[in-house]
Amino acid sequence: MRILLCNDDGITAAGLLALYRSVRDLGEVTVVAPAGPKSASSHAVTVGIPITCRKMHVHEEFWGYAVAGSPADCVKLALAELMPDRPDLVLSGINHGANAGVDILYSGTVAAAAEGAMFGVASAAVSLEIAQEADFDRAGRIARKVIDSLLAAGLPPASLTNVNIPALRPGTPKGVRLARQSTLAYEDTFEKTGSGGETMYVLTGGRMDIGKDGETDLHALRAGYVSVTPLHFDLTDQAALARLAGVPWAAEF
Ligand code: MN
């Protein structure tokens, strides 16, 4: 099996090393990742500017391509240029911090996997909820078990799976929960500083109370379970499509 490994925390991140170690025996692993941290870069792509790509030896353990671009850039470049043979699987992570709920939309980790899925490759993003100490070695072993289950179930081409590992404590994870994505927004506040003609704002705030409907990815994590959420990048609102079908649109302009 050929695996493309990417992330958004940068090629030297501990989470990427952990995921590399946990899947390297599955086949041939090609690492193409941002040269530096690109968290919350979402699905950005670099256009009209050359992207530097440097082959580097990472942690004296593997060779990878460090790309001065976004996570989506990395996957594009890997599929179009760096990997003569198409990967069977794109893996992104392990991200330092959960990518559940609306964070999925901000996440560069998920975007890298989504990019793989857009090009027809089965893809999965793996993230670890922040705890006092991030035990990526253990997270890697957990990720591998989940990936094995997904592979055994059969990951169709172009499928996109979002995996979140809960904060690791004794007794967690308690298991795996299939969960839908929470759509709960953040309660945004800004810290305001500055003087004169310039004001600076720093995004603060936090998440709203996630409520009691225990079905979402956020609830699974809070309960100490690994959340598995199949996603699609087709953002069509099917219900609205049906609702708007009856609109008497103007026929002439
Ligand atoms: Mn990140």
Image: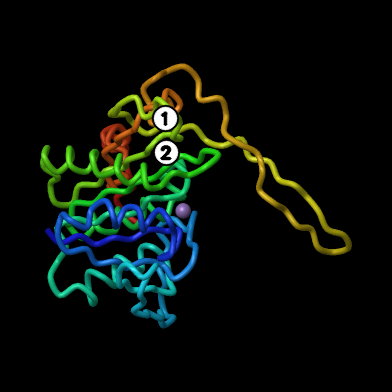
Percent position of residue 37, x then y: 49, 63
Q: Farthest residue in the top direction? A: 212
Which residue appears at 30% of the width and 39% of the height?
A: 142
Task: Please say if 134 is above or below 48.
Answer: above
Residue 221 tag number: 1
Percent position of residue 236, x then y: 30, 43
The answer to which of 119 and 131 lies nearer the viewer is 131
Mark earlier in primary sequence (1, 2): 2
* Secondary element type, mark 1: helix
Task: Tell me the quadrant of the picture where the N terminus can be found.
Answer: bottom left
> Alpha-carbon distance for marks 1 and 2?
9 Å
Residue 179: which quarter of the image? top left
Residues at circles 1 and 2 in contact by the CB criterion of under 8 Å:
yes
Residue 86: which quarter of the image? bottom left
Which residue appears at 48% of the width and 61% of the height?
A: 38
Nearest to viewer (mark 1 / mark 2): 1
Q: Which residue is labeled 2 in the image?
A: 100
Q: Amino acid at mark 1?
A: Leu
Q: Farthest residue in the right direction? A: 196
* Secondary element type, mark 2: loop
Answer with left or right where residue 242 lies relative to residue 153: right
Q: Amino acid at mark 2?
A: Ala
